[in-house]
Image (tube, helix red, strand yellow):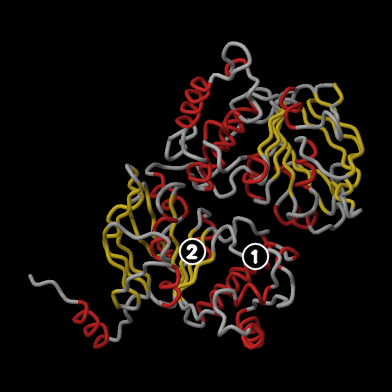
Amino acid sequence: MTETTDAGRQATAALSGAAAPAIELRGISKAFGPVQANKDISIRVMPGTIHGIIGENGAGKSTLMSILYGFYRADAGEILINGRPTIIHDSQAAIRAGIGMVFQHFKLVQNFTVLENVILGAEDGALLRPSLAKARKTLAHLAEEYELDVDPDAVIEELSVGHQQRVEILKALYRHADILILDEPTGVLTPDEADHLFRILRGLKEQGKTIILITHKLREIMEITDSVSVMRRGEMVATVKTAETSPEELAELMVGRKVLMHVPKAPANPGDTVLKLENLRVTDAEGVDRLKGVSLTIRAGEILGIAGVAGNGQSELLEVLGGFGAGKVTGRMEVQGQEVVLAGHGATGQTRRARGIAHVPEDRHHLGLILDFSAWENVAFGYHGAKDYQASGLFMDNAAIIRDTEGKMERFDVRPPNPHLPAQSFSGGNQQKIVLAREIERNPVLLLVGQPTRGVDIGAIEFIHRRIVELRDAGAAVLLVSVELDEIMSLSDRIAVMFDGQIMGERLPAETNERELGLLMAGVAQTKGAAE
């Protein structure tokens, strides 16, 4: 049988009234040394649709999209845009082909304005004034058409994360992108910001734009996409219509086994008080009160979940307790009945670890890892004085640390399992596993954990939740901060809700629901019968 040519396929499609795929990848393969990131991947994305791509961390999703956007060159395979073979050797070629990409970590110049960021690299000539005037007019039109309202004269560093993401989308649309790739777009957004993003994406779709959504959140896939492709270990294992699948089926396709969507746990059996906070107050360098008299207790063998919209004091709470706080701090902190220094000399992460306090920070890049250092060096950070890491005299036993890191990587399924790779070489989810392995496996008396599954795939979420529950069952106290309400509801034995630097109330998961918690998160006063 003779193979149909590209011209023949396009002619057949035209005669039948069927549109060519906006994007078609055929037999794409890419290796990095011995690691096969993509293996013979083929995918078709139809125009005017939202197409999800999911898979575990390290499955090859971002590599595939980086090939489509010109960051990498495929070792083999072909790219077709709107039915035409297209060579994409760099990002400028991708932009000329009508492709725009919004990265998980934004590519914005922080001290430039919105307008300056939008025209950067797309100026019409040596004189900036005409380009700025044109961009201002175009941005006003795009903002109105796609609900992308943002002040063009605002400086990027003064904008919320949600508004910075809108700027990235505006940059792509300003460059006439008809195809948008979004990599984990809600990983840094509040629930309200995520909902607004979905409204924007639906508006873009209605205008005929094609959208590829890379995410690990199955709820988002079910809510927003028309079809979804599943990758596993560098290969494409399935493409299905979203309306014809389920979260459970997608999770099984991703992981290759059945996955528990909610980790079962026995009722808590609390023991003695481990953490006691009294009237904790934090005032930042600008004189703004970030924490306003927070008092709480956590006992051994229980998980206290802190719910709240990002920016209401949860981050400051974790940082102060973990020894990373800044500004003026007052109040009292006790661990196992002994006072812990809250500020000044002695208030460090190192002294906290000596007291049995482990800390998984919300921001793994700035507080959890040194990205230029290897995985095994990152595993040693904060624990370099541990006896099992010491050689004779004053020297560390690097070989012992490397062996320990190899074990942690195997148990936490870090990919690739190479302790010598720099932390920046791992995907965000695998970076998170490195931090979690370092902190959890030291069997702390108190675990402070912020956003434990941010950027982590469904199989790893199940594993991380199990480890947190196991730590609780072993007698540790756990303070959990998460913007994912389902995570708070699933893991917590008690829930405290924060708003504007204060505890609005406490609830038991079995006696509340997301609506009531949402009201407390919005600052609505406690309802009758609320726990004090």
The mark found on residue 241 in the picture is none
Asked if one can make out residue 237 in the rendered structure from this viewpoint, the answer is: no
- From this view, report whether residue 229 is shown above or below residue 397: below
- Comparing 512 with 150, the one in front is 150
Which comes before the other along the chain, label 1 or label 2?
Answer: 1
Q: Position of residue 127 (x, y in %)?
A: 62, 85
Left or right, residue 207 beside residue 131:
left
Classify the position of the C terminus by image quarter.
top right
Outermost residue, front side: 126
Left or right, residue 126 beside residue 231:
right
- Comparing 375 with 44, the one in front is 375
Determine the secondary structure under disc 2: strand
Residue depicted at x 52% and y 35%: 375
Which residue carries the number 1 mark?
109
Q: Quadrant of residue 510?
A: top right
Q: How much space separates mark 1 and mark 2, taking CA atoms?
A: 24 Å
Left or right, residue 181 beside residue 346:
left
Q: Quadrant of residue 10?
A: bottom left
Q: Position of residue 362 (x, y in %)?
A: 67, 45
Which residue carries the number 2 mark?
213
